[in-house]
Every structure is written in structure tokens, then in C-alpha cells.
Amino acid sequence: MMLSSSDFASASWELIVRVDHPNEEKPKEVTLRVSGDLHVGGLMLKLVEQINVAQDWSDFALWWEQKHCWLLKTHWTLDKCGVQADAKLLFTPQHKMLRLRLPNAKTVRLRVSFSAVVFKAVSDICKILNIRRSEELSLLKPSGDYFKKKKKKDKSNREPIIEDILNLEGSPTTSGPPVSPGLYSKTMTPTYDPISGTPASSTMTWFSDSPLTEQNCSVLAFSQPPQSPEALADMYQPRSLVDKARLNAGWLDSSRSLMEQGIQEDEQLLLRFKYYTFFDLNPKYDAVRINQLYEQARWAILLEEIDCTEEEMLIFAALQYHISKLSLSADTQDFANESEVDEVEAALSNLEVTLEGGKADNALEDITDIPKLADHLKLFRPKKLILKAFKQYWFIFKDTSIAYFKNKELEQGEPVEKLNLRGCEVVPDVNVAGRKFGIKLLIPVADGMNEVYLRCDHENQYAQWMAACILASKGKTMADSSYQPEVLNILSFLRMKNRNSASQVASNNETMEMNPESFVSPRCAKKHKSKQLAARILEAHQNVAQMPLVEAKLRFIQAWQSLPEFGLTYYLVRFKGSKKDDILGVSYNRLIRIDAATGIPMTTWRFTNMKQWNVNWEIRQVAIEFDQNVSIAFTCLSADCKIVHEYIGGYIFLSTRSKDQNETLDEDLFHKLTGGQE
């Protein structure tokens, strides 16, 4: 090849680019003569001309190995990018195969953008899987323990489990051309039936080009059969708060791409609901989303990632048993049956949007007439070396405060004490069988937590006061439109707990058919004989036996949300000025400092009182400033500080969502709130 003298001008130099060709085992090296004023797009054009292979190169881009970044700004020159002769560039497809393990333990294999930031990649994945509200999910790189089975004492070689993978690749052969990028840019519009005007097949064909529509769509909307007790016992179960903190170390950075975070092609990641604020759950469109949420909740209960009482465990078991029975019967698998959906919608009209974390419509409160509660309740304050003794007082609940008096006649005078519940923790302390209806209040004070126990006489009183406490903790009064639905939700949950003793005892056949250990945590299963456990689950099942499938799943999600620890994500941290490690719990509206040894919450800080937060990237320290000159700073020991910072910013971003936004999200605002000014 003859070279003209102009090619050897002082500004030009040789650049070696490796080409990741799908049909070649090893990347092929191509040498090009370039100059600093050549732009990235021009370099790619030169490269394709020199390779001289007729194929669609539109998905290919340049990856700079040493700098660990994509060169996606094709109008930038090599000088502006800083590319010199020693740069190692790889010309590779932006979309690569990835295996995603969903909350229902099913693995899907699909083509994902390795060059888009994770926030955008998750949005694209959710479009393919028919999951709305992708901002609630993210990708988690599992820790080494996650896929490992526990070591068995017996060395018998069991058959390896062959993973059931749903392959959603665009073409049947892995070496085929990549899926057109157009697949990832569709807007989220439901397909409507032109005659009836209802969404076509109700929940399934959200995206006409989704590979799921070509296969059996309902596969992700139906729950998996229960795991065998042996498989359940083999799974990793966190035993302490520190173990739970480790589970959250692997969340990927939403502002960087998969490739930048070292994710390899065909690697396995977990797709999970990361933020526990489920906005606008609608049975008509959200069959897949509701099922995956139910599955995530189910596994959290079974593997004890969240604590619950034995009584609650039995309700969860009864609902799971009911759902698995309905999922097996063929007639429930017709999601196009609108009448069923309408029936469910009617039954859930108050439950659909107000599931915890969804923003209820803030109806203007009538300031002149805020309802109040007044009644006799018992109160107890825990003190060291004193046995629990409840004392009766006359209580008045008004606005967001509780005042109590020695008796009703003194209510016009000065109360014994007034408790302001704004920002407090409200924990149910209930045993329906034992007729115990208690409310535990953890009220933040300057030096930690003020702990108060209230005891109600009966279910109705408990539901009213509990709902009022929950709303007051969020700064809302009983005039808020969500008060009555909250009371009804609490009552319906108590009724599920109230096992129907008059109901006929389940037949022996049913007891024998059921495998009760599959519906409870291994620790709970060890405490009871199988027959006894089956009888108790079937007894609890009588209260939910008439529920339609979608309502049962939503009830399960709602019961999960009513657990005291719901929505808390744990991190092991060291607070500035402290000599010991603590646990930081991050929730949708607050941060909680928890004693790592005892698990007792010490201090709560609400996001509504937050003025600013930032990261000192040199010492990897998160600093947060609150009202009233309160400021905290901590370093994160169980994960990168960016993960915790993103959690806080992400929750604040999600609180800005509103119904009128439709499906559009302000992605720039998300990155602004979660980026930490890196």
C-alpha cells in the first residue's frame, strides 16, 4: 500500500482498535492512521470502511479500556476526548445479553444496553417485561453467598438443579444480529381494543413489540409453585441486622453504565424493587408488577429478611396457599376477563393507590373541623427493673398530638403529658388470639427515643387510634382523605388474623395434600409438627378462601407493608465522633440509627426536616443537615457511600411523583438528587 507524504504529517499517528466481531472468537485488531482533529464518528466510519464487512454496525460504539468509559459523543474530536496513540479502544456492540433473576426466582435472558446509564437500562428492561414504574426497581449484583447452597453434612451428590431460563433474545440464535435499538425507545402506551375501548388483553400486551407477546405472556404474571422445604432450607437467610446490611451492598450505581461497573456479558444480576414506594398499583395494567411485588414480599417473609410474629407468618402462609391453589387452576389464567378485574377494582377501590408510599390526594383539610378521638386507654412507659404495668388514663387525640389526663373530668385542665407524634415510629403490638391490641410509639427526642405503649380494649378502638397515629407520624390529621381507608385496612388485616373457630375443620385429605413447610420460614417450620402446622394454615385460610387471585396478592403486599420493619434497608455505618459501628435504616421518609447489637432504634431523622446532604468523596463520608441545627455525618462500612446517598436522593425523587405526570419522569432531576455532585 503506497502512502502519500501528507499521511505522515506531524499531527497524524497510528491507533490500534480491537473489533469485537460477533462471528469471531477473539477481537480482531485494526490499525488506523488518525489525527487529533478527527471526531469519534469519523473514526468509527474509517474503522467500518477498513473492516469491509457488510453488516449492520449501528449498535457498535467505542469503549476505552484504560479510562473505563464509552466514547458516545461522536461529534467530539480525539483531542477533546484525550485519545492518544497508547489508548486501547474496543469497537463493540452496546447491547449485550444479560441474565436477570426476577423476584419470582425466574431467570430471563435478554439483550440490554451496556452503554446507557443503569436508570435508563432498567427502564428499557421493564418495558420488555411489561412492568410499569421502572423507577422503583434497580439491578443488584448478588453477594457471593446468594447463589451458594449451604454445606450439607451428608456428602451425597445430588442432581444439580437446571435453571429454568426464559430466553427473550430477539432472534432464536445467539449469534444472530442484535435487536434493533428501536425496541428500547417505545413510549409506554397501552394497546386498546378498538371495539370495547378496554386495554387489549387487559394486562399483557402493553408493548406490541415486547418479545413477551410472542411467547406465553402470562408466565411473569403468575406465581411460581412453592419451593420444597429442602430447597428453602438451603437458601441464604440473614441472621442479624449486619447480615441484612450485606444484602444491600450490591446495588448498582444508577448514574453509570453496566460496562463502567465491570458487568460482563451474560452475567447474572438480580432485578428487584429497590424503593418501597409503590405508586399507582392498578390491577388492570399491573399484573406482572403486582405478581413480582408479591413474590419479592413472599421471599422476604420466607427467608426472614423481615421479621414477623408467628401469627402473622400463618396469615402469610394462608394467603400463599390460596394464591398457589388459584394459580394452578386453569380458569383464573384468563386475564382478559374484564369482569374479574372490575370486581377486584371495586373491592380494592380504596386500596389501589393508597398502598403505603403512594401519595394520597391531599384533600384540603377543613381547618375549622378537624376530627378528634377521645377515650379511655391504658398507658405504660418501660423503665428498667419495673414489670410491665399499664395504667388507665383519659386520652384525647387532636391534630397530630395525643394528650392524656388522669380522668375525663380533668380534660379542660392541664394534661399529664402531651405527645407530639409527628416523625415518630408507630409499631403494632397485637395478638388477636390473646385479645391484645397494643400500639408502641417511639417518639424522637433530642437524646434519642421516648418509648410509650398504649393498650386498646377492642379491634375498632385499636383501628381508629392506630390509623390516627400512622397519619400523625406523617404530619397528617384525621381530616385527611386517607384516614377512613387506613382504618378499614387495619380492620380487614385484624379479621384475617382472627381465625374463624366456627369454620369447619379442613378435611384430612386437604391436610395431607398440603406441604405446610413450603409456606413458612424454615425456623417456623421446625417449631411445629407438619400436621399441626397444616391445620393452623388451613384454619387461617378460611378467612381468605373467597378472595380472587389479584386481591389475594394485593392483600399479601398490604400485610407485608403493615409489618414494623417494612421498607427499611440496612447499612453498617460509623457515625462521626462514635467509637462503635451502628446500623443505619433507610426508609421512604426517614433515616433511623439502630444499635447494631440490640436492634433497638435510637434516633430518627425525617426527610421532611432535611435541608441538604452531600458526600465528601475523598473520605467517602455522607453529611446531612437538618432543621434546628441538627447535622450528622457517617461513613458506610458495608457498601460504597454512593449507594446510601443514592437511596436517600432516590426516595426524595420518588416523593415528587404525581398522577398528572402520566408516565414521564424527570430523569435529570433523578440524577441531580442521587449523583452527589461527583
Image (cartoon, rainbow, N blue to C red):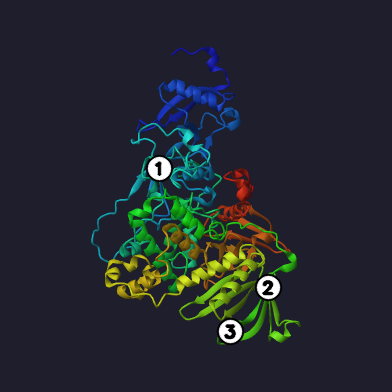
SS at mark 1? helix
For discs 2 and 3, the disc positioned in front in the rendered view: 2
User: Position of 474 compared to 99: left or right?
Assistant: right
Q: Which residue is mark 3?
A: 384
The 10 Å Cα crowd at callout 1, few under 14, some 14 to 19, many 20 or more, is many
The numbered dot on residue 212 is: 1
Relative height, residue 90 to residue 529 (above, below): above
Q: Residues within 10 Å of mark 2 (few under 14, many from 20)?
A: some
Q: Nearer the viewer, residue 142 or 456?
A: 456
| Quadrant in which the N terminus is drawn | top left
Q: Position of residue 223 (x, y in %)?
A: 38, 55
Residue 149 visible within the image: yes
Marks 1/3: CA distance? 60 Å
Looking at the image, is 292 positioned above or below residue 68? below
x then y, percent, for residue 215: 36, 42
Q: Nearer the viewer, mark 1 or mark 2?
A: 2
Q: Nearer the viewer, residue 300 or 536?
A: 536
Give the spatial CA distance, label 1 vs label 2: 52 Å
Query: CA–CA distance between discs 2 and 3?
Result: 34 Å
In percent of width and height, residue 560 lies at 48, 64
Mark 3 falls on what kind of element?
loop
- For residue 372, the mark is 2
Label 1 amino acid? Leu
Sequence order check, earlier mark of 1 and 2 = 1
